[in-house]
Image (cartoon, rainbow, N blue to C red):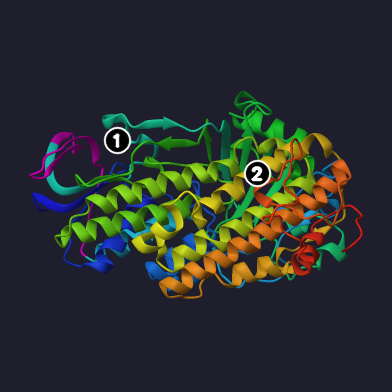
Amino acid sequence: MQNKYDVIIAGGGLAGLTLSIQLKKANPDISILIMEYRDTIAPIAAHKVGESTVELATHYFREVLELKEYLEEFELPKHGLRFFFNDGSKEELSNRVELGPRLKLPVPSHQLDRGTFENFLEKHTKTFGTEFMLGARVKDVVFSSEGHEVVYNHDGEEKRLKAKWVVDATSRFSLLKRKLKFEKKAPHDVNAVWYRVKGVVDIDEWSDNDKWKTFLAPKLRYLSTVHLIDKGYWLWIIPLGSKNTSIGIVADQDIHPFDTINTYEKAVAWIKKNEPQAYKHVCPPENELLDFRILRHFAHDSERIYSSERWAVTGEAGVFLDPFYSPGSDFISLNNTWLSDLILRDISGEDITVRAQIYEQTHLRWFESWLPIYQDKYKLMGSSQIMVMKIFWDWAIYWSVPCLLFTNKGFTDLKVLKELFVSEDSIGRKFQMLNKCMQDLFLEWLPHENKVFENKYIDPLDLGYLKQFQQGIENQHSTKELLDRVKSNVKMLEQVAAEVFRLVSNEVKGTPIDMKVNPYTITLNGTVDTTSENALPIDDSIAMDVKKMWFYKTELV
């Protein structure tokens, strides 16, 4: 063991392990020590939550870290996110409105057993020369321009080591956030409980409806991240590569208080009441559980992420929003990409002061702009029609801009960041404004939408623009081509927003179905611009696509 390292990472979970691999692949000569408080290997199945990945993180794992071979051999493929909405009784799954892809998605993703995966990552990073210390709990960091001093307990003794860079990957322990007092609350009061059960839970076996069971190829529903949804909550069912299953309840505090789910006994009673069919399949005797975990008010923000004084936070030691769309690994991927770029440039002698400021501002602004996707939206989950529209909108904005920027290294290209986010009328600012308008519209719509639907199947890839966005994620572009593509995608999103508003406003207020609409002014509670040069006419192709997720009868234009 050395006395001084280029990088010491406090925390040997997913964020810290993947950061070390990313750094070592770029510069094998960097000396890295990971200090992990647990003193044994990670347990299989019952290790950590965060088992489901989506497209951005999958690209990070498969392409950036080059773990494709491992993922395909040892972890499960994932067949997208799948949603089942309230049909009034929730006694027969085949009767509920189902949203999810019928065929395998063009861009892959995975279901991860976090214990298996992190044990592999530990072994893998060691092959690059990373040192890994178990049973080490970091207590403090003494900052110095001559090298930071890391104070830690190991083998019952207090010890010290020096490092040029110190990275806090201690998850919710948040070592640096507490030390430097840059905690920040997130206004999203949602709680979670989860547990792992032995064996496979295949929702196809819940129904005797042969037509429904054979509508998809065998195991495609099983390999999805399943969401059972109603007002104020969703229940997840996630298969693990260890042939076990993760079950979780995520619920809005105002609608389903934490004290109604915070023990296994209470969680079982809650599932029996709210998801009676699931209760019969996902609630074994408590002594058969692999674990049971709880987390109150899981969302949290931060005032700092990266410092040119050679410290940073990554993973849940920084920010976390909500697991509904499985974005946890996405935030780790973005976080580590910005952070590794800073460390590598600094080690090579570059002044990173400006980059550190830009990356931190971009990171925090991105968190702020993504918050409206979740904040106050659990109250919408009892409405199938609103949620179908919302989920498809949320996927569209995710696939069309952040995924595309990430796969094309746009988040570390200062020219791209400047073009997209610096000026008030930049395309990135417009993108964020457009999303806020749509998220507000979904809330305004709620008092007018209470119909219960059943026996419907909606496939996101039946919508041409969504399919185009998803298939385009991994296409490689020059800087100019990337900026042009983002601008083009945002223009398409403007047309989608305008068309969704036409349908909603027509249903709620009786406005003309063919009116022009400025998508940046849409509201059910005020004046909408329908006459200026910014008001968009109908795009027939987009109108046809949006109509596919509309449950009411409206004449096609």
**How far apart, in angstroms, are the residues tagged by discs 1 and 2?**
34 Å
Write down the region rendered in magenta.
129-158
Q: Outermost residue, front direction?
A: 532
**Amino acid at circle 1:** Leu
Q: Mark 2 or mark 1, which is nearer the start of the sequence?
A: 1
Q: Is residue 435 magenta?
A: no
Quadrant in which residue 121 is drawn = bottom left
Q: Is residue 516 visible?
A: yes
Query: Residue at (57%, 62%) from the top-left corner?
Result: 399
* In this rendering, position of residue 556 left or right of residue 19: right
Q: Is residue 12 visible?
A: no
Main secondary-structure element of the magenta-colored stretch: strand
Q: Mark 1, mark 2: which one is toward the viewer?
A: 2
Query: Residue at (34%, 60%) from the top-left corner?
Result: 414
Tag 2: Cα neighbours inside 10 Å, few (<14), some, or many (≥20)? Answer: many
* In this rendering, position of residue 451 left or right of residue 523: right
- Observer-nearest of 288 and 258: 258
Q: Which residue is mark 1?
A: 175
**Amino acid at circle 2:** Gln
Tag 1: Cα neighbours inside 10 Å, few (<14), some, or many (≥20)? Answer: many
Q: Is residue 144 magenta?
A: yes
Q: Which residue is mark 2?
A: 439
Q: Is residue 292 above or below residue 110?
A: above
- On the image, the x and y values in percent for residue 314 come to 35, 47
The quadrant of the rendering that contains the C terminus is: bottom right
Query: Residue at (30%, 54%) from the top-left corner?
Result: 339
